[in-house]
């Protein structure tokens, strides 16, 4: 899917840019966004290290497991493939809580920590698991209880009631989340998106080769 | 009241965690400093791992935006959105949402300058902005951090969520704000 979308974005950009006489801007954008990407990634290093450190303490103290146990009734249904007390669960809960509170500096590092834990359970390392897709769906829906950025913009532009969009935003994002999560549950069974058996069997052949070699 | 409570929690959530976790860890005989450093080691690696994925996605989206293809797409799709009663002016903000957060914010700000933040369009684009995340950015960063290239159904599911969010935003703004 991403292969086609990526291909389409680039090809359309060149063709339309040429027709519109904006090919220079298109080229400039390519360079500029390449640089922006690196800046974003580098900017993550510090907060990433901070939260990975804190999470390691929490994990060694058994707190992440405790948190996972707390939400077991919900997580069992959403993530049937993940053992209910796996550290991935604890990290996912913290990520989602940080999203709700609009703490983006904490949400991304915690989300990436959750991905790291989910990857440990993944048999085919270059392919997304069902649990990963569901977790991403929870994130792209992203319920935020106070959308602070847009409220700030509304305030600057002289809105009489800048916060009046809180309710509508929560409603819309709850809807988006429910649909995205349900979509992962349905789509994961479709033949196009199913985990390819060949991927798994080659992985297990490799493993058995390894064992025979011992 | 709701706002006050939430912003209180937002301000105190992180200091509370930074206070509680070391205390409980000490109680459980964890060597907190050593444990922190062991965990934090991974920060650099994760950030660097994301770079190729982020460059791929952001460059493609940046080129697409710069080419003016968005305007073309808006014209192409406007009969459908007219049909469901989406104001034509708000359509670019809606379509930009899964591609770029800063792009959407820019469009939303322009629209609110023009129509006023308390107009129906102003309220609608404000709701669009907060209602979903930048799906492609999340996919690049999250999957990139663990080296997953084959994203399977994650992107279509995210886009279905985005679409549902847009329609829900339009519906609820109609109900609450009229227009």
Image: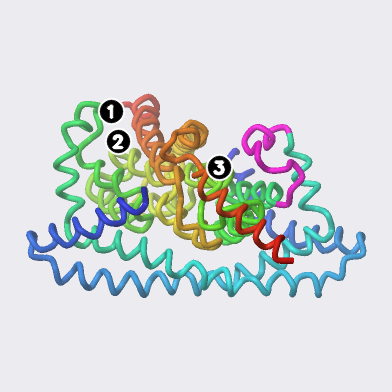
Q: Residue shown at 59%/38% (left/top)?
A: B2
Q: Which mark is residue B179?
A: 1
Q: Secondary structure at mark 3?
A: helix
Front residue of B6/B43: it is B43
Q: Is disc 3 on the same chain as disc 2?
A: no
Q: Is residue B7 magenta?
A: no
Label 1 lies in what chain?
B
* Residue B79 x/y as whole percent: 16, 32
Q: Residue shown at 64%/43% (left/top)?
A: B5
Q: Which mark is residue B120?
A: 2
Residue under circle 3? A130
Q: Judge depth for marks 2 and 3 and give the one in front.
A: 3
* Residue B77 x/y as whole percent: 19, 38
Q: Is residue A92 left or right of residue B34?
A: left
* Residue B139 x/y as whole percent: 46, 54
Magenta stretch?
A: A73-87
Tell me whether circle 1 and circle 2 mark residues in contact (CB < 8 Å).
yes
When asked about the image quadrant of residue B68, the answer is bottom left
Count residues near mark 1 (Cα–Cα under 10 Å), then give few for <14, some for 14-19, many for 20+.
Answer: few
When asked about the image quadrant of residue B59, the answer is bottom left
Q: Is residue B103 visible?
A: yes
Label 2 lies in what chain?
B
């Amino acid at each position: 899917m991403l292969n086609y979308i990526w291909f389409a974005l680039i090809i359309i950009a060149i063709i339309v840019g040429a027709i519109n006489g904006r090919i220079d801007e298109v080229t400039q954008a390519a360079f500029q966004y390449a640089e922006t990407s690196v800046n974003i990634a580098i900017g993550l290093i510090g907060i990433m290290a901070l939260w990975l450190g804190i999470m390691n303490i929490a994990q060694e103290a058994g707190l992440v497991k405790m948190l996972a146990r707390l939400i077991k009734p919900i997580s069992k249904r959403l993530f049937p493939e993940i053992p209910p007390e796996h550290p991935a669960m604890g990290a996912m809960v913290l990520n989602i809580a940080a999203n709700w509170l609009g703490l983006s500096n904490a949400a991304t590092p915690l989300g990436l920590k959750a991905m790291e834990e989910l990857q440990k359970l993944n048999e085919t390392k270059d392919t997304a698991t069902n649990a990963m897709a569901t977790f991403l769906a929870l994130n792209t829906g992203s319920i935020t209880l106070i959308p602070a950025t847009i409220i700030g913009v509304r305030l600057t532009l002289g809105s009489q009631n800048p916060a009046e969009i809180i309710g509508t935003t929560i409603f819309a994002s709850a809807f988006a989340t429910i649909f995205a999560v349900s979509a992962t549950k349905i789509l994961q069974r479709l033949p196009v998106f199913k985990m390819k058996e060949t991927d798994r069997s080659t992985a297990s052949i490799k493993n058995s080769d390894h064992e025979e070699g011992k | 009241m709701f706002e006050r409570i939430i912003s209180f929690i937002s301000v105190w959530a992180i200091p509370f965690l930074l206070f509680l976790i070391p205390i409980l860890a000490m109680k459980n005989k964890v060597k907190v400093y050593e444990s922190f450093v062991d965990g934090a080691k991974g920060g650099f690696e994760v950030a660097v791992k994301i770079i190729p994925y982020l460059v791929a996605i952001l460059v493609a989206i940046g080129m697409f935006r710069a080419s003016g293809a968005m305007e073309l797409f808006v014209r192409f799709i406007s009969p459908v959105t007219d049909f469901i009663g989406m104001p034509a002016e708000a359509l670019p903000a809606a379509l930009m949402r899964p591609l770029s957060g800063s792009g959407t914010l820019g469009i939303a700000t322009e629209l609110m300058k023009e129509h006023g933040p308390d107009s129906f369009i102003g309220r609608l684009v404000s709701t669009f902005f907060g209602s979903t995340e930048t799906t492609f950015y999340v996919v690049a960063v999250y999957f990139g951090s663990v080296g997953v290239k084959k994203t399977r159904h994650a992107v279509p599911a995210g886009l279905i969520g985005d679409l549902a969010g847009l329609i829900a935003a339009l519906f609820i703004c109609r109900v609450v704000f009229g227009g």
